[in-house]
Image: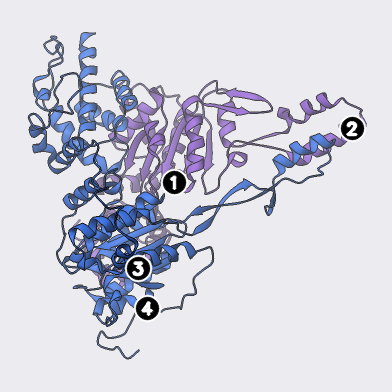
Amino acid sequence: MTATVNFAQRALTFARLLRRAGVKTTTGQAMDFVRAIEHIDIGSRTELREAARACLITHKDDIPVFEQLFDAFWRAKPEYADGSLQSGQPEDAIRLAPEDGDEGEDEGDGDGRTLEGIQGRRLGLVESLEETEGEESEEGDGSEVFSYSAAEVLRQKDFADLTEEELQQTRHLMEQLTWQIGQRRSRRKVASPKGRFIDPRRTMRRSLQTGGVPLTIARRQTKTKPRQLVVICDVSGSMDRYSRILLQFIYAVENGMAKVEAFVFGTRLTRITRLLKHRSIDEAMERVAREVQDWSGGTRIGQSLQTFNTQWARRVLRNGAVVLIISDGWDRGDPELLGREMARLQRSSYRLIWLNPLLGSPRYEPLTRGMQAALPYIDDFMPVHNLASLEALAKHLCTIDDCRPVRRQHPVLPAPAPGNRAA
Amino acid sequence: MTTTITINSVDDVQQAMAQHRYVCEKSLATAVYLGLKLPKPLLLEGEAGVGKTEVAKVLSAMLETDLIRLQCYEGLDVSHAVYEWNYPRQMLAIRLLEDHQVGWDVAMHEIFSEEFLIERPLLQAIRHQGKPPVLLIDEIDRADEEFEAFLLELLSDFQITIPEIGTIRAKHPPYVIITSNRTRELHDALKRRCLYHWIDYPSLEKEFQILKVKLPGISERLALQVARFIQALRREDLYKLPGVAETLDWAAALLALNQQELSLEIASATLGAILKHQEDVQFVRKRKLEELVSTAVAED
C-alpha cells in the first residue's frame, strides 16, 4: 500500500514539475493521473508515459517538454517497494523538484539550474516571470501633465525620431486608443423583438397566455461578433526603428480588444499571441524578444507568408478575419513566391491591409521588388509611422462592416517581370 | 467476431481495436483505456483524415453499444443539440384540448410532456437505456465558444435541465469522444475536463499495416509502394498534406483501376485522390512526381 502512496506522491511531484516548466496542468488533472495509476501497469515505463501524457497534457505544443521532463524524472525505476522513498525524497527527482512544501516559487536559482539544463529557455522564462509577477507601474511620471499642443506634435512625429521619453508618452497615448473592429454576422441567433426569424419556442410559450393563439410572434435575429484580427509584423533589420513601438501597438490592440492573433517574422515566422498575453507590457516585450530568434536580421516575406498560409491560416483565419501585415516591403526572397502567397492570403482573408511605415514620407514610392509583387493583392495600403496614422487605422478598422470589399480579380499566378513598372 | 470482450488492460483495447480493423499504437490505446476506466471524455486532436472519428465508431462496435453522433457547426444551439419541442403537434393539441373543455393547468401539463419532446443527440445520450452508449462530439472546433461553454456543464454532471420537465440525469454516463481538427484552439476549461491525445500521421510501417487491414485485396507490393509514396509526399511543402483517409482512397482507386504497381502515368492521373488543392496538384505533378514515384518503387 505504501508503495502506491509513494508512487502517487511521485506522480504529484511530476505534475508540479510540469507546471513549473510552463505546462498548464491543473490539480484535477494531477489527481486523474494518480487515479489512472491504479489502472495501469506501473512497472511498464511506456504505459506510465502514455497514461501521464493522456492525463496531464492538453496542448500538442507541450508534448516535447513533457517528453523531456518525463525522461528526466522517471529516469531510474524507483525502488518504492522497500519504503526507502517514504520521506518523499526520491533521489533522482529531488534535484529537479524541491519538496519544500510546494513553495518553489521564491527561491529563484539554486535548484532551478538543474532543471534549466533540461528545460533551458522556457524555464528561465518561467522564473523571470515569477520574479516580476508583482506590481509595476512606471507611467504617471508626468505623462498626464504634458499639454495639448505637445500631444499634437507627438501625434505627428515619426516613430523613428522619438526620444526615449516620447516613446513612453506615445505608449501611454496608444493605450488610450479604442480598437473596435467591424462585426460579422455569426450563425447564432439571439432573441430580438424586431428580428428576421421567428422564434417558435418563445412564440409557443407566449401563445399559452392567450389561449393557445399566437397573437404575438417572438422573433430572433443573427448575433454579430467582432471579426478576428491577425497581425503579421516584420521585425527584420530594416524595420528596426519601428518594430519595437509596433509591437507595443500590437500589445495595446490585444489588450483593448478581444481577439488578436499576432505573428512576427524576419527570416521565419513566429507566433507571439501567447507571449503577449501578459499583464505587464514590459514583461510581454521581454518574452517576445527572448523567443523570437531572427530579430533584426534579413527578411524573407514570401517564405514567412508561405509558412503562415500552410501552418496557421486554417487555424486563425476563420470566419472572415482581417489581416494586417506590417512591413516596409524590403524583401530578400523570391518576389514570385511573395506574389503567390499574397494572392492566397488575400483569398482566405476578409480584408488584407498592408501597413508600411515608409508610406508616411511624402516622397515614398512602393518601388521595391517585394512591394511591387505584393501590391496587387492588398485591399488597403496605409502608413503606420506616427500616432496619427494609428488613429486613422483604428477608425478604418471600425468601418469594416459586413459587406465585401470591391476587389479586382487577379490571375492566380502573377506574371510581370520585376523591372516592369509601367503599369 | 462477436465474442464479448472484457477490457482489463491497455493490450485488450489494442487487440479489440485491431479486431475491428483499426490499427492503433499503444499511446492511443492507453488513452482510450483510461477514458473507459476513469471514466473521462477523450479529446482527440489531429489533422484531417487521421482516423479520429473512426476511433468512436470502432469503440462502439467494440463495446457493442450504440454510437450517438453530434456533428458540430457554428451556431449549434440547444434546440439542435439537446432537445426541441414539436411545435406543430403542440398547436394541434391545444386545438383538440379546447374542444374537450380541459382545464388550463392540465392542458399546459399535456403540451409540455415528453410526448412532444424531440430528442437531439445529447439528450439521447443522457436518456439512453441499457449499456452506456458512445457519444461522439465531432469537430468541436467548428462550433462556437457558446456551445463549448454549454458542453462544459454537460460533461461535468451528465445532466440536462428542461424547464418544463425537470432535470434528467444519465443513469449510465456515456463514453464521450470529442474530436477536433484544431482549426482553432479550444478553451482550456474544456480541455481540462478531458483526456487528451494527439493523433499524428502514421509511420511507414503503420500506414502499411492500415492499408493491408483496410483493403484486404491489396498486394503487399502495392501497399508498400503506396505507403512509401505518401510518406515521401508528406515531407513536401504542401498546403494540405494527405491524411490516412486519402491514402486509403488512393489505394482503393488504384485497385479499381487494376493496378498491381505504381507507375508515373497512373499516379499522375489519380493525384486528385490525395491532393485537393490546385496549387498542390500542380506543384507535385510538375516538379516532384517522378522523384516520388521512383522512391516509392525503388528496390523492394
User: Residue A118 location, x and y as percent?
Assistant: 11, 37
Q: What residue sits right under mark 3 in the picture?
A: A389
| Same chain, labels 1 and 4 | no
Q: Secondary structure at mark 4?
A: helix
Crowdedness near tag 1: few (<14), some (14–19) or many (≥20) residues, C-alpha within 10 Å: many
Instruction: Give the CA distance from mark 1 to mark 4.
Output: 33 Å
- Foreground mark, 3 or 1, reads 3
Q: Sequence order check: which comes first, mark 3 or mark 4?
A: 4
Q: Which residue is mark 1?
A: B141
Q: Chain A's colour? A: blue
Front residue (pair B126, A101) = A101
Question: Which comes before the other along the chain, label 1 or label 2?
Answer: 2
Between residues B98 and A244, which one lies in front from this camera angle?
A: A244
Kind of residue at disc 4? Pro
Q: Are marks 4 and 2 on the same chain?
A: no
The mark closer to the camera, 4 or 2, is 4
Residue at which label 4 appears: A376
Q: Residues within 10 Å of mark 2 (few under 14, many from 20)?
A: some
Q: Is residue B30 visible?
A: yes
Pointer 2 chain: B
Residue B230 visible in this rendered orientation of the protein: no
- Specify the quadrant that holds the N terminus of chain A: top left
Q: Nearer the viewer, mark 1 or mark 4?
A: 4
Amino acid type assigned to the residue bearing label 2 in the image: Glu
Name the residue beneath numbered marker 2. B98
**Chain holding disc 3:** A
Q: Is residue B121 above or below residue A300?
A: above
Dots 3, 2 in contact, CB < 8 A: no
Q: Position of residue A156 (x, y in %)?
A: 31, 69
- Chain assigned purple: B
Q: Assess disc 4: are there few (<14), some (14-19) or many (≥20) residues with their C-alpha within 10 Å of its C-alpha.
A: some
